Amino acid sequence: MRPIVFFCFLRTLMLSVLLSATLFAQAEKPGAEPQKRFSILGLGDSITQGGESFQCYLFPLWQKLYTAGYRFDFIGPNESKCRIGILNNSGFGGKNAEYLDAQIDSIYKKYPADIVLLHAGHNHFDTENPVSGIIDAQKSIIQKILKINPHAKILVAKVIPSGKLPKYSYIPSLNKEIAKMVRQMNNPNVILVDQAKGFDWKIHTIADKVHPNPAGGEKMAEVWFVALKKILKPAEQVFEPKLVSYKQLDNGDLELHVFEPQNNKKGEPRPAIIYFFGGGWSLGTPLQFYRECAHYAAKGMVAVSAEYRISYLHKTTPFESFEDAKDVLRWIRQHASELNIDPNRIVAAGASAGGHLAAATGIIKENRNEKTAISSKPNLLLLYYPVIDNGPNGYGPEEMKKRFQEISPLHNVDSTAPPTLFFLGTKDQLIPVKTAEEFKTRMEKAGAICELHLFEGVGHPIFYYAKELTENYGKILKLSDQFLQKNGYLKD
């Protein structure tokens, strides 16, 4: 390695080590700085990586950490698909601990995570008598990681049991040896996590009796989460929404994530703001708008982040997503009294495809054939880089473009459109500035209000909710506050 290249690598590695040393609970002192962002490397086989037919622990763990307010990233060379797109990891389907040991130097040098979640022990046969070899490989993996970064935390799992017998008859013996290995290492950075306890392959795996089903993935995530909380500093902000079912489907309920203001007792009804997440009507999670919901609940509003059907989970189209969005507004109005909400002061908000849903509820005429007298139209719109043109030259799947008159906000503007706040980056790849300006022009010609704010040089999205927030996020929040104050939804 050339001297300059080696120096750059060494400097990067030292910075990573110094950062790692500031993350964990035992290092915390009174008045210490808030927790820095940290990285997690899931290391293992297909049980870590996930697959088309089974559930891994990555996404439910991501949900738990995000809801608990932690700032983190999953890293690694491989990808696991989930409802928010992908989560990176170092799970290698079909590979065993010995394979991981042979690769870990190059993996960890490229992905020097602060925390490693090691779950490895499958992909052998009992007839191989594999336990001693797996233990040797795990010891070697741990030693190699700690040589590169002595401050790394390595959570070593007793592996989940399997009903695939006699192939995996060795797992109980392996787990005893894993526990013994961690005790003998006697290193505070090497921590035993008992993934085997309470994991029942009869109820926690798919038909192959090996890979986790959704309940199994959730079980593993909870065990990792409990272990992580013991070593991490307390998060700056914990999100504690109340989950309320608003719609029953054959494969489960759709829920509202409700953030109530303090002292939300019966009395003067509160204004409400309802957020719809982005993701092309295909991906996404209500967690996207937890920060905004917590912000507005603290300011006295009832804030809601809404679940709706997406194609990744429900095999649906944007038309079903729109039906759900309307049902959210109706449900909120129907239950306004028990939620202490003013039904005449409801804001619909959202980003990208979620911005489309918010805009569509406010602009598309209500269908007279729908069997309810409760209105699904919000009183105010707050739109983050929304998809507003679903016409032939706009954005959306082909069926949406064919039926754009039913669902495209741009093509349905009239005088009943609510006052609207619209944010867009000038380099947005999906929504041209001219489209936003045309929307504003049509709104004003119809006698409606549209306040458009362009962010110079910014693409789509303007900010990423799961990454470090930029200055633009603060600008959007400030402008949103001002818009809500101007319209009487927030006090000055």
Image (cartoon, rainbow, N blue to C red):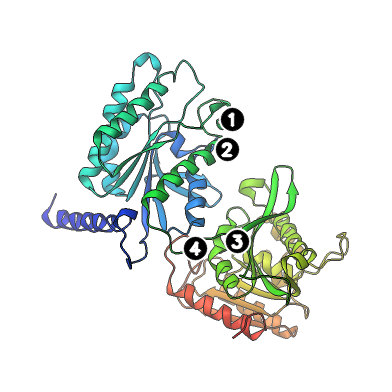
Check disc 3: other Cα within 10 Å, few if <14, some if 14-19, many if 20+.
Answer: many
The image position of residue 145, as x and y in percent, is: 25, 42
Closest to the camera, between mark 2 and mark 4, is 2
Spatial separation of the CA atoms under disc 4 and disc 3? 11 Å
Q: Answer yes or no: do the residues labelled 1 and 4 have beta carbons within 8 Å?
A: no
Of 34 and 460, nearer the camera is 34
Q: Are marks 2 and 1 in contact (CB under 8 Å)?
A: yes
Say left or right for 21 vs 236.
Answer: left
User: Is residue 265 toward the left or the right of residue 113 in the image?
Assistant: right
Task: Identify the image quadrant of residue 402.
Answer: bottom right
Q: Is residue 390 visible?
A: no
Which residue sits at x=29%, y=57%? Answer: 27
Q: How far is mark 3 from mark 1, CA to CA? A: 32 Å
Q: Residues within 10 Å of mark 1 (few under 14, many from 20)?
A: few
Q: Secondary structure at mark 3?
A: loop
Amino acid type at mark 1: Ile
Earlier in the chain: of badge 2 and badge 3, it is 2
Discs 4, 3 touching: Cβ within 8 Å: no
User: Residue at coordinates 40% horizontally, 19% vertically from top-left?
Assistant: 170
Tell me how far mark 2 sits from mark 1, CA to CA: 8 Å
The residue singled out by tag 4 in the image is 465
Callout 4: helix, strand or loop? Answer: loop
Indicate the position of residue 295 as horizontal and vertical percent values: 55, 71
What is the C-alpha distance between the residues marked 2 and 3?
A: 25 Å
Instruction: Indicate the amino acid at tag 3.
Output: Phe
